[in-house]
Image (cartoon, helix red, strand yellow):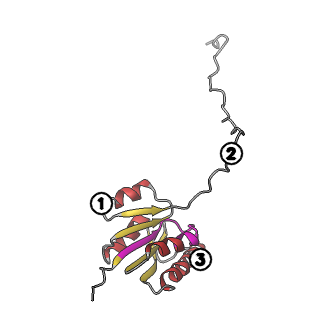
Amino acid sequence: MTPLPPRTRYLVCATRPRIKPELLRDTIAELAKGNCYVHVVLPAVLPSTMPLSAYPPRLAERLEELRVTAERAVREPMRRGRIEIMPCRSVQSAIGQAIEEGMPDEIVLVGAAPWRLRRALRHVAPFRVVAERTSAPPPVAPGERTPAPVSLPAYAPRRRTGTPPAA
């Protein structure tokens, strides 16, 4: 009997509460094949002027929708995992709190990730960013020209004319 390969640990973190739930679901489904453990963190980023325990109801609704989507993506095919909404001051601090519980084999950021966050994670663990895909521009038919970019005239300051005011 051959032993199972070691369980792969993924830390999936949404970078914004407004990401599409389908993007989170598809990312978890793509990652979690085989023997793995998926820890999903949904940061509730709050400014320092607000207490961490009191995030606004609209933010709570969006994060709850993402939590339900992540729960279905993890639990349906009988995967092991954990999903949590984490009140914090930044996405980076949420990832730091999640890493304290156990170092993942890979960190997956879902949504746009600023360069500061990427730079901070560079030495922590391997990571990748799964961003929302934008639609491509419509194809141009053969023989049809694309519109030329509009060029605006260069700014030239006005020259002062006339005599200076009398003192």
Residue 163 vs 1, above or below: the answer is above
Q: Which of the marked residues, 1 or 3, is nearer the chain's N terminus?
A: 3
Q: Amino acid at mark 2?
A: Val
Picture coordinates of residue 40 (x, y %)?
Answer: 44, 76
Q: Residues within 10 Å of mark 1 (few under 14, many from 20)?
A: few
- Which of the two residues, 163 or 129, is positioned nearer the viewer here? 129
- Which of the two residues, 117 or 88, is positioned nearer the viewer here? 117
Residue 84 occupies quadrant: bottom left
Q: Amino acid at mark 3?
A: Glu
| Residue found at x 36% / y 69% | 106
Spatial CA span between label 1 and label 2: 44 Å
Q: Residues within 10 Å of mark 2 (few under 14, many from 20)?
A: few
Query: Which image quadrant: the C terminus?
Result: top right
Is residue 167 located in the magenta-colored stretch of the structure?
no
Picture coordinates of residue 50 (x, y %)?
Answer: 49, 70
Query: Which image quadrant: the N terminus?
Result: bottom left
Query: Pointer 2: what residue?
Result: 140
Instruction: Kindly check if marks 3 and 2 are in contact, taking CB atoms under 8 A apart as contact.
Output: no
Q: Residue furthest bottom?
A: 1
Q: Amino acid at mark 1?
A: His
Picture coordinates of residue 68 (x, y %)?
Answer: 55, 81
Picture coordinates of residue 5 (x, y %)?
Answer: 30, 80
Query: Pointer 1: what residue?
Result: 123
Q: Secondary structure at mark 2?
A: loop
Q: Which residues are magenta?
A: 9-24
Spatial CA span between label 1 and label 3: 34 Å
Instruction: Kindly check if marks 1 and 3 are in contact, taking CB atoms under 8 A apart as contact.
Output: no
- Which of the two residues, 29 or 127, is positioned nearer the viewer here? 29
Q: Secondary structure at mark 1?
A: loop
Query: Pointer 3: what residue?
Result: 61
